[in-house]
Amino acid sequence: MVDFDVVELPEADHVAVGEDAPDFTRPLVGDEYWSDTALSDLDGPIALVFFPMDGAFPATYVWNEIRDRGWGHGDTDDVTVVGVSVSTPYEHKTFIEEREMDYELFSDPSAEVAEQYGAIHDLDGMTGIREHRPAVFLLDEDHTVEYAWVAAEWPEFPDYDEVEAQIERL
C-alpha cells in the first residue's frame, strides 16, 4: 500500500527531441573532488539525469537503479551518465559515497538548470522552494536531445528499459 500522496504536476514545457541541449556551468561532483564544469566540456553521448534532492527517496531509487543497471559501463559504456539536482557539492559527495556510485553529479542549488530544461518543481506550500523533477535527457555527440522524459506526477520514475534501449541507439 502506498503511504504517500501521488501528486499530479503541471505540464512541463521541457527541452524537446531535436533541440540543442542548453549549456550550463555548475560544480560537477565526483567521489574525490568537484570543479566548475560546463556541460559542453563533457563528451557525448550523455545521459543527463535530473533528480530531487539527495536523501529524498526518489533520488535514492533513481540512482540505485542506474547503478545496478550499470549505465555508462558494460553494454552502455559509450554514454557519459551525469546527474543534476538542487543538492550542494557536500551533499552530493556524501550521496555518492553512501550509494557507492561511479557517477558525477552537478550541483544546481538555484534550480536554474532545471528551469532551463523544463524539469522544475515548485513545492506546494513552500514559497520559493524548488527542486528538480525526475527527468532523463539523452544527448548525442553534438549535444542534440535524442530522448526526453520528464515526470508528470510525484513520485514518478522513468521507464528504465526504454531509456536503456534509447542509450543503445545513441
Image (tube, helix red, strand yellow):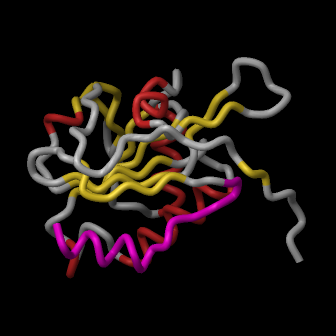
Pick the front one: 76 or 19? 19
Q: Classify residue 108 as left or right of residue 73.
A: right
Total marks shown come to 0
The quarter of the picture where residue 38 lies is top left
Pick the front one: 151 or 61? 151
Magenta residues (range): 153-170
Q: Residue at x 48, y 29 (%)?
A: 115
Pick the front one: 38 or 23? 23
Q: Residue at x 26, y 39 (%)?
A: 21
Q: Residue at x 21, y 38 (%)?
A: 20
The quarter of the picture where residue 30 lies is top left
Q: In this picture, is 160 found above or below 21? A: below
Give how far across and how far down residue 139 sits, in percent: 22, 52
Q: In this picture, is 104 found above or below 13? A: below
Quarter holding the C terminus is: bottom left
Look at the image and say whether residue 112 sits in the magenta stretch.
Answer: no
Give how far across and how far down residue 156 sits, in percent: 64, 61
The quarter of the picture where residue 117 lies is top left
